[in-house]
Amino acid sequence: MSETNPAAASEVAAPHRYTAAMAEEIEARWQDFWEADGTYGAPNPSGDLAGDPALVARPKKFIMDMFPYPSGAGLHVGHPLGYIATDVFARYQRMTGHNVLHTLGFDAFGLPAEQYAVQTGTHPRVSTEANIKNMQVQLRRLGLGHDPRRSFATIDPDYYKWTQWIFLQIFNSWYDDEAKKARPIADLVAQFESGDRAVPGADGNARAWGDLSAAERADVLSDFRLAYASDAPVNWCPGLGTVLANEEVTADGRSERGNFPVFKAKLRQWNMRITAYADRLLDDLEALDWPEAIKLQQRNWIGRSEGARVDFPIDGEAIQVFTTRPDTLFGATYMVLAPEHPLVEKFTPATWPEGTHEVWTGGHATPAEAVAAYRAQAASKSDVERQAEAKDKTGVFTGAFATNPVNGEQVPVFIADYVLMGYGTGAIMAVPAGDQRDFEFARAFELPIHCIVEPTDGRGTDTSTWDNAFSSYDAKIINSSNDDISLDGLGVVDAKARITEWLERKGVGHGTVNFRLRDWLFSRQRYWGEPFPIVYDEEGIAHALPESMLPLELPEVEDYSPRTFDADDANTSPETPLSRNEDWVNVTLDLGDGRGPRKYRRETNTMPNWAGSCWYELRYLDPHNSEQLVGPENERYWMGPRDGMPHGGVDLYVGGAEHAVLHLLYARFWSKVLFDLGHVSSAEPFHKLFNQGMIQAYVYRDSRGIAVPAAEVEERDGAYYYQGEKVTRLLGKMGKSLKNAVTPDEICAEYGADTLRLYEMAMGPLDVSRPWDTRAVVGQFRLLQRLWRNVVDEATGAVTVVDAEPDEDTLRALHKAIDGVRQDLEGLRFNTAIAKVTELNNHLTKVQGPVARSVAEPLVLLVAPLAPHIAEELWRKLGHTDSVVHQDFPVADPAYVVDETVTCVVQVKGKVKARLEVSPSISDEELEKVALGDEKVVAALGGAGVRKVIVRAPKLVNIVPA
RNA sequence: GCGGCCGUGGUGGAAUUGGCAGUCACGCUGGGUUUAGGUCCCAGUGGGGUAACACCCGUGGGGGUUCGAAUCCCCCCGGCCGCACCA
């Protein structure tokens, strides 16, 4: 390294040249200064971080990154991309009159930290804290202007105390559908006690609250609580040894982390009733300044569908279906229930009805046998297999018939795995003529297909000749009438409205909205997560720990690794690491509920790694508050609603797009609960979201396909060689496993942190992925060297800047740069901002003689957000004694932003034929006259007359010859 | 299958949103400084063409709208991302 280090030899010729060694010295010195000075401390209105009222009085900016996992691998140059971007933006905001909150914490619970700890054999807390320290050292080297007083890790008991506190808030509340907000569960109990609200009974009959046992009351409340335990089928992943949320399972039925198969299993688990917020989560997206792609993903995930619920009578009861196409009810020729639908047993008869078709029975002697066999087969399949077989429609007849409410027809009831229990009512009416899935099933089981929409593609109404279902919103409904109603001749929209009205009038159905979103599975069988502040009494009733018992800290256990299983073995069940510590699990406590000291068993699940990141933006605001998760005044100041931000929130949140339906959805949900309960004034956590792209890197593979160390690959004549052997090159992720990681440390060692910051910002637009190219970094280093040289004499170290009037060209270059850089930084277009700084700097390099102070100083200020260390150093050299961080960002003089003359392009038939130097204020008429008189234009016209002239003064004239 | 985004020099990328295609940087070529390599400095660099101009071609391909298209519309090709038996 030292031989190729530009620092070494050049020092002889130019002892005061800006070199890597000098950069390192400057950077370390200013980082120490900032730390000692508390330069980046943002004052709060109140509390222990209250400060300078003049600064507090400024408009605020809360600028945040998605905080990192402190993994043991350390950082590569891809990680800090977003941190550098927010830092540049935060510095710019500080220089334009804002009180800026910018800090960074650590998301330290969860699977990666635990797995790393398992691998290295050390306690997760020990390895995690070591990793945090290591990462802090790496990050400090980059000169990020974070407020260190506000940093924390989610594993700090002072922090997770409040994560647990929020859980209890959610546990102790319910969603009032009328008020459309969460309310304390005590309000619901009061309604039950007073009789204002009927107590729902298992058999549908109302009961008196006072007559219920404690266990019965707990069961009733559990159906309302926003955090509740249930036995619903969950995603069980034996390979990881834990259950997972829907959001953590990939489309092909595998765990997002580890890529293990996932099975459906009935296990008692904690859930969060995020579905109660489906409509608000959808509606409030409108006012957020987020990338459309992420909004769209959330909309799709929430999956709002308008339709109707319709009852199909059977044996004096009914099977309810959800459909988005109630207008096709007359074409419903059979029904399908999900295999696990609870009504299946109820209606399954003892024997097959007379003459049941052989293909319907699956060869089984009785319906019960057929159903049992099909269910067993469905349950044994992993989602992966189920997915793979999606093409073939399977199912079995239950032996039962229900009544189609519009035409009284008896329709057979099937179970099939193409209907999912988790969506709608878990039951559908099948309209094979209009739905491709139903069509395939009907063909496989020889079921009737009634044409109820007139085909517009010429296929005719004889469905026996059809190859697929027909569906079109432009077609007319046919064959759809009874004595009471006719949809015939109507379009889809009108038919839907009419049939829905009819269903409601007859009391057999109603219009409704259905959501795809499911409740959030919130418990994990892990050690390294927040323990639930929940205990169970001897009756098995869950009780919340009182706030005074928080934080409930993780106990020491012999073995904190999760129990994992053969990844393909569905017949396994989870084991929680915390359950191994009997002393911790079995406790005698006085919960302060008047029942005195009693024996309890602690909940041994832990919270998912998303819990800590669901509210961390709030803790940055008031990190040491021991009374409240955040003081209201501080919360309102930094997060409260204001003009253009009706729900409040963080001013800028930068991070990867991979959290679209995970962290970003969960955090919005918690935000709304806390808002409803009056703990915060912001109903949204993040007003503006920006997704940074990924820094990619070339991956070189040998003939066996194995990645070889990228740093040792040589290029010759467009081909790549590793140890003489030819290798292939592809663009991929950067990382240790692909042997192409480049660390910030090595770039800092070779060029300094300012160069690294500039390079990462100059590579391209922040939201686009682009390949890392170490050899291109030198370009930004050269920029800083030239900048240095424009202020400092390399041989003597003396400042060369003079107090003289700059020339007109230089003034224009300066003010155009100021104007452009301001606009670009405002819009997070760091790459073009740097190009403009470079242009100005190159201009000064080319101009003879020393640089005027009135140009050098604003130039240093322009550079300050991007390369803060060299800017501080030059600012000091220019004679200032204060830090550059809080200087005012230069303001462009409009008089110099426009050129004295502009180049006007004269086109003939759209091709450029001449260029004119004209005044920017020239009139269209004048410009046309000048253009037509230009000799090159006259020559290009060659005597032809002029048919038309388009003038866009002062930039362009286009002449169309006759 | 459905939905979304994107294709510009050898490379990363600019283009005031319909008005000079290629800002800035890497790389490359030539020159200077240097004992030499590297660093550093200067110049050139879309392709064809020319001694040099001129001129011609050019934003994945094809068509269209327009005085004028990288930008708008249609078709095709290629790539990336999301969802996916959601009734």
Image (tube, coloured by chain):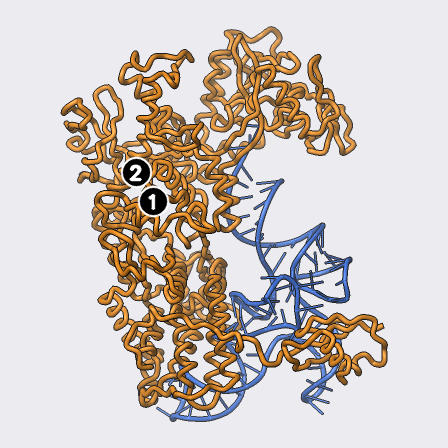
Chain colours: A orange, B blue
Residue A133's spot in the image, x, y percent? 24, 57
**Residue at image point 32% right, 88% down:** A798
Pick the front one: A918 or A139: A918
Quarter of the picture holding the N terminus of chain A: bottom left
Q: Which residue bears the numbered disc 1?
A: A615
User: Does dot 1 land on a helix, a strand or a loop?
Assistant: loop
Residue visible at 32% across and 51% down in the picture: A69
Query: Which residue lies under the disc numbered 2?
Result: A166
Is residue A140 among what the camera can see? yes
Q: Is residue A655 above or below residue A96?
A: above
Q: Is residue A888 shown left or right of residue B2?
A: left
Residue A76, quarter of picture: bottom left
Kindly check if marks 1 and 2 are in contact, taking CB atoms under 8 A apart as contact: yes
Tag 2: Cα neighbours inside 10 Å, few (<14), some, or many (≥20)?
some
Camera-nearest residue between A683 and A689: A683
Element type at mark 2: helix
Q: Are marks 1 and 2 on the same chain?
A: yes
Evaluate whether residue A721 shows in this view.
no
Please provide percent x and percent y for residue A531.
Answer: 25, 37
- Residue type at mark 2? Ile
Query: In the figure, A659 relative to B64: above or below?
Result: above
Label 1 crowd bin: few (<14), some (14–19), many (20+), radius 10 Å: many
Q: CA distance from mark 1 to mark 2?
A: 9 Å
* Residue A802 placement (x, y as % from top left): 39, 88
Mark 1 residue type: Trp
